[in-house]
Structures are given as C-alpha cells and as structure tokens.
Image: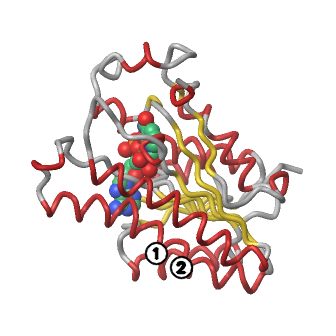
C-alpha cells in the first residue's frame, strides 16, 4: 500500500517542472491523479505515460468554469477529490514597482492568487461531503521574504497571498478535518527557473547554505507528506524548503 493509497488528487501545472515531479511521486505512492495544465501536449503525454491512475484535463487555473470541468471529469473517473495541490504559477515580468504594467500585475495575480482561491473553492464541497481532505498550496520563498535581486511585486504579493489564504482556509475548515498548508520552495531547477535566471540564478547559489539549487523531485516528498495521512495534525502552516536560503 502506497502512502497515498485512497487519495484522489488534483495537481495543477502538472505538465512540467515541479508539478510533473509531484504527479509522478503521487502515482508512485498509490494516488489517483488528475493532472491539469494549459500545456495540453506535454500534460496528455505525461498522463499517458503514468497509466490508468492518471488523467489529464486541459485547464486554466484562472477560470472558474475550468475548475468545474476539472472536478466533474476527475470525479467521474476516480471518485470524490480529497487532495488538491495548487501548483500552477507564473513569474511575469521582473521590474521595480514603479515600472510594472497594470495588466501584467493583474495577470500574475489571476494565475497565482485567484487560481488558488478558485481551486480551493472548487474542491471544498467534495472534501466537506467526504469528511476531510488536504490542500497543499505552492507558494515560494517569495511568500516569506522580499526578493532583493529580482524585484517582482506581483509575484511577491501573490505568493504572500497564497500563504495567507492557506491559513484562513485551515482555520475555517479545520473542524471538518480539512487541512491546508503552504509550501515555500527556494530555487528549484525547472523550466520556470531556467527561463527566469542565468545558469547560476544570478549568483543565487552562493547564498544557499547547501550551495546549490534543488531538483524538482526533492520538493515532492514534502508535498506527498502534506497530502498523506502522515501529516494528520499539520495544518495552517508554511513549510519552507530552500536549502537554508532564508535561514541567513
Ligand atoms: N522553480 C522555482 O525555483 C520555484 C521556486 C519557488 C516557487 N515556485 C513555484 O512552484 C510552482 C511550479 O513552478 P515550476 O518551477 O515547476 O514552474 P514551470 O514553469 O516549470 O511549470 C509551471 C506549469 O504551470 C503551467 N501553467 C502556467 N500558467 C497556468 C495556468 N494559467 N493554468 C494552468 N497551468 C498553468 C505551465 O504550463 C507549466 O506547465 C509555481 O507556483 C512557482 O511559482 C517555483
């Protein structure tokens, strides 16, 4: 029996990067997984490779109608959803606050913040009916501390919002055995990070006590733990996984 046996999980942004790593880890631990993403080609190929315990649904997390379709398709295939991993996110342009275009700010917040809100709202009825569930919201160290080298108010604001919304939901729904936790990775080698930084992340590796960036599959064990019943008394908390970066 896997650590996620009996779990039916939605993982957003699952076509690549950390979402892909989480989807692989979840299936390996016995979960049924609904992978969602706007990247249909890669997501469908990954779901096919993962086999009958995986289903891909094309989905923009900023769309409420899209969320309804994800829940309907997922529950028709696997039954009620009891785990949600809100992983999809974008960086948007790096610029100091005076130079951010309003449209860029709104777009980043729509994906990173509104998407997380819509996801929680979409699965809460299933979790309430089941008598429990686990929500794992992927924030960032940018939801813990300000970013000195690469200013991005929309990213920072939305990632702090994810942390706050997570606590609010944990408090509102704890009595229903629904847990909510946020995960705050530091630098992780994914297509997002590679696109946003040069080879050594603008010298960021030297600011990490472990001296390197994480691999995506080094984040997945924490997400598996938070999704599983092993974390049955863990809720409302931020979990930093950054190689020690914010310790100094
Ligand atoms: N890579 C890092 O260093 C790092 C650090 C801290 C936090 N994070 C966060 O971790 C999460 C995953 O990041 P990653 O590095 O794997 O990124 P990534 O860009 O490699 O993958 C993100 C996935 O999300 C999908 N996506 C983008 N917009 C979407 C939308 N509107 N609806 C649905 N899917 C959408 C993309 O198509 C992509 O497949 C993000 O929330 C990111 O902010 C990343």
Please name the residue shown 73% across and 57% down the image: 31
In the image, 77 versus 15, the foreground residue is 15
Helix or strand or loop: what does disc 1 sit on? Answer: helix
Residue 121 tag number: 2
Please name the residue shown 80% across and 80% down the image: 131
In screen coordinates, is 95 left or right of 246? left
In screen coordinates, is 26 left or right of 197? right
Residue 161 tag number: none
Most extreme residue toward the front is 248
Write down the residue under mark 1.
118
Q: Quadrant of residue 228?
A: bottom right
Q: In the image, is residue 46 above or below residue 108?
A: above
Q: Is residue 38 visible?
A: no
Inter-mark Cα distance, 1 to 2: 5 Å
Please name the residue shown 19% across and 45% down the image: 93
In screen coordinates, is 80 left or right of 35? right
- Local packing at callout 2 (Cα closer than 10 Å; few below 14, some 14-19, many 20+) is some
The answer to whether the residue labelled 1 contacts the one labelled 2, judged by CB atoms less than 8 Å apart, is yes
Q: Is mark 2 within 8 Å of ligand 1?
A: no
In the image, 155 versus 127, the foreground residue is 155
In the image, 108 versus 23, the foreground residue is 108
In screen coordinates, is 108 left or right of 32? left
Q: In the image, is residue 80 above or below residue 147?
A: below
Please name the residue shown 58% across and 58% down the image: 85
Horizontal and vertical percent position of residue 115: 41, 67
Q: Is residue 213 visible?
A: yes
Horizontal and vertical percent position of residue 203: 34, 16
- Local packing at callout 1 (Cα closer than 10 Å; few below 14, some 14-19, many 20+) is many
Horizontal and vertical percent position of residue 127: 70, 78
Horizontal and vertical percent position of residue 142: 42, 43
Helix or strand or loop: what does disc 2 sit on? Answer: helix
Q: How many marks?
A: 2
């Amino acid at each position: 029996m896997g650590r996620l046996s009996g779990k039916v999980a939605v993982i957003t942004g699952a076509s690549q990067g950390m979402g892909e790593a989480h989807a692989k880890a979840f299936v390996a631990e016995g979960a049924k997984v609904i992978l969602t993403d706007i990247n249909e080609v890669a997501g469908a190929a990954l779901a096919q490779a993962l086999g009958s315990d995986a289903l891909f649904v094309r989905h923009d997390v900023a769309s409420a109608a899209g969320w309804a379709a994800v829940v309907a398709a997922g529950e028709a295939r696997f039954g009620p959803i009891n785990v949600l991993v809100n992983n999809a996110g974008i960086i948007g342009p790096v610029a100091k606050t005076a130079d951010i275009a309003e449209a860029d700010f709104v777009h980043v917040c729509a994906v990173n913040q509104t998407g997380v809100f819509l996801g929680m709202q979409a699965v809460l009825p299933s979790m309430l009916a089941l008598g429990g569930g686990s929500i794992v919201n992927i924030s960032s160290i940018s939801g813990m501390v300000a970013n000195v080298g690469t200013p991005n108010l929309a990213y920072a604001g939305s990632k702090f919002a994810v942390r706050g919304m997570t606590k609010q939901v944990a408090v509102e729904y704890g009595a229903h055995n629904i847990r909510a936790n946020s995960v705050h990775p530091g630098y992780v080698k994914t297509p997002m990070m590679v696109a946003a930084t040069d080879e050594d992340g603008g010298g960021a590796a030297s600011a990490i006590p472990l001296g390197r960036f994480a691999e995506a599959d080094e984040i997945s064990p924490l997400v598996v733990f938070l999704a599983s019943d092993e974390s049955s008394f863990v809720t409302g908390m931020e979990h930093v996984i950054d190689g020690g970066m914010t310790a100094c």
